[in-house]
Image (cartoon, rainbow, N blue to C red):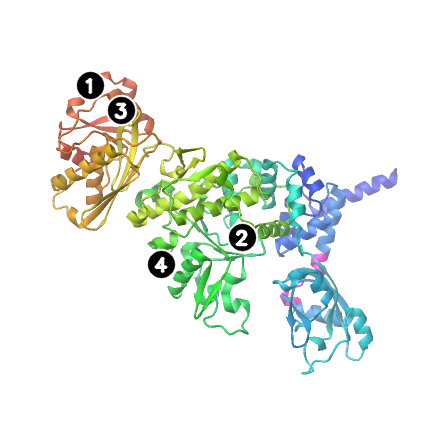
Amino acid sequence: MTSVSSDEEGRTAEEMETGLPEFDGDALDAKAIDLLAGKVVRKDLTALMRRGANVPTFMLEYLLGMYCSTEDPGLVAEGVARIRRILAENYVRPDESEAIKSRARELGQYTIIDKISAKLDEWEDLYVASFASLAIEPIVMPEEHVRQYDKILQGGIWCIMRLEYVRAGEESDDALADAFDTAPRRRSRRGHGPADSPFRIASLKPIQMPNLDLDALLESRRDFTAEEWRDLLLRSCGYESAALGERQRMHFLERMVPLAEHNYNPCELGPRGIGKSHVYKEVSPYAILLSGGQTTTANLFGRLNASRKATLAERTGVVGCWDCVTFDEVAGMRFKDMNAVQILKDHMASGSFARGRDQMSADASMVFEGNINDTVQNMLKVTHLFEPFPPEFNEDSAFFDRIYCYLPGWEVPKMRAELLTGHYGLITDCLAEFCREMCRRDYTHLFDRWFRLNGDFNTRDEISVRKTFSGLAKLLFPDGEMSRGEAEAILRYAIEGRWRVKEQLKTIAGVEFIDVNLGYADVENPSVVQVVGVLEQSEGTLVPEGSLLPGHVFGIGRAPSGDWDVYRLENKAVAGDFRFKTEGIGYSRTVRESMDAAFRYFEGNAARVVAGMRKETKDYLLFYNDLQGRGPSDEVSLAEFVGLCSAACNRSVEPSLAIPGVIRLSGTMDEVRDLEAIFRVAKAAGARKVLLPLGCIQGLQTVTAELMGSVSPDFYPDGDAVAAAKKALEL
């Protein structure tokens, strides 16, 4: 009885000494431990160990997965203590390199933890090993390790190794042959080569995953539901899924797509402190994070005309050496020469780039992250959402068109304690290997059995959406098996991410990117198109508060069904020869004729609105937004006339204003009727004012006091569209 009590007291003391957090497991934890033993680790232990150990996360978690994959607190405490001892005694730090070499010499052998890589020396017919931190001249790598762990030849692997030091004259060829299990060591021709080093590797054990049995992992995935697997992935990155909403979960998963999809180029801009760079810095050893600052073409894409003897990094730069390259704090990016920007665009578009006479290929995904210093709505009113990029990018529509998905960082919560998981997740090395293996697969076609993209997609739009869909599908459904509803949810998210890019391109370049009405249709019913849209464009209501961009105006008209609706007309004036182009109208002849009538009236009467307006030196572009998908109306021509005047004089219309009314080709205007319905629709859309002719004053008696209290009328003389435009523009 006494011995048991003593044991319990000792265990409690040990737990208190280690400072282990209390663990409250759930059903998913038990399932993960049972099905993925050795591949999962408690993420709160990772955070605990990271405080006192500046070592790669994937290496630390591999040790935790080896020694702490249990729910027994006593065994966890023992495992943590053992890991701490291993790291303190055996982890190689560059400044301790000479001390470790001395210990190996004095003791005859010493156990170290370091990253080791090897290459074949074909002239000496042997493998040559080199270390990441230990400053030892290249030494011979035993062949059995290379055969067993081929990852040693593919950039290297973190290992725990027993390093031996053999003094000159203390060994025979036979003893050396036994140690290496190969032919006796041959002296180098120079007498000072890898085979002549007194250091040799006596034993080696990887503490990274040397390889991943993807088929076995996929088999284990089938025992999890879609929600359980999604939560496990999020926990594997350190996040607690239960503290996130559905859209937020998709945002966090989207951050992982560049690790699972080759040549994928997303962008995330948002507030500070939302963990934008965490996945690329801590989760994968195949990703590199480039902090804001000056960089060169050679650093990114290799030296020009590099010799054949040059290293891989010298020939291809970081783009050729890593699977994912992340530019952090994009506002601080600087290039010594603009040639780097052009090469970057080439790589983003095709996965290859030219350096001198050579055409080089690379699979690296390019990720762009940065902070926004204003509210999204204010940015949309005065500029665009790519504004934080440096000047050399800011007006480069060709560069932004190569971005596949814009992740709205303003929807991601700031990192707090409750968002960090204390449950089990895949060790980061396992997660990284899983993502890397999934890069070899192609799931871009999986939604074709149910859906077709609509006609507004160009080739680059389609590639963007398909690659986003493919990456998310690989993460959530790695075996490719998913339901129609699951595929639709991923497809809608992918379209939204690309639509957000097109919306900004429309503001930057106008006519080239005006077709932003991206959507999809059911294969069995292709005539019904589902338009996705982006949330920030409406801010919860159709008519946002505050000023709009010049040329933007809201019109009220009847849809083809006869119901009143609100439409957003986005006009843009660019240098040209007084041409008028429209998008978003479709094939409706009556709507097109009504917009033409507004333009013809603008042609003849714009000078009466603003004197000296040089309208003939510009082209006018209209994007017709059917906000609720009920079909375009042919009764918003007065609003379009006001929008054209607004774009021409670069002056915004009155805030929160909605405009009903029809202008005919003859220049006459139709009477405005059904005022109660107009006011009701205006209120529902968020408008605060409605522009009406004076003749409607008597008809306002039919409008309820509730509606009149929410929406106020603003009057202009009957039949005078010029006066209406002046009123709307507050002239």
The magenta region covers 86-96
Q: Is residue 71 left or right of residue 625?
A: right
Q: Taking 2 as reference, is 396 above or below it?
A: below
Tell me which label, 3 or 4, sits earlier in the chain. Answer: 4
What residue is rendered at 52% in x and 48% in y?
A: 257
Residue type at numbered disc 1: Gly
Of the two numbered discs 3 and 2 in the rendering, the one whose residue sits closer to the viewer: 3
Q: Secondary structure at mark 3?
A: helix
Tag 2 secondary structure: helix
Quarter holding the C terminus is: top left
Q: Which residue is mark 2?
A: 280
Cα–Cα span, label 4 and label 2 = 25 Å
Q: Which residue is mark 1?
A: 699
What is the C-alpha distance between the residues marked 3 and 4? 47 Å
- Examine the rendering and report whether any part of residue 22 can be seen: no
Q: Which residue is mark 4?
A: 392
> Mark 1 to mark 4: distance in Å?
56 Å
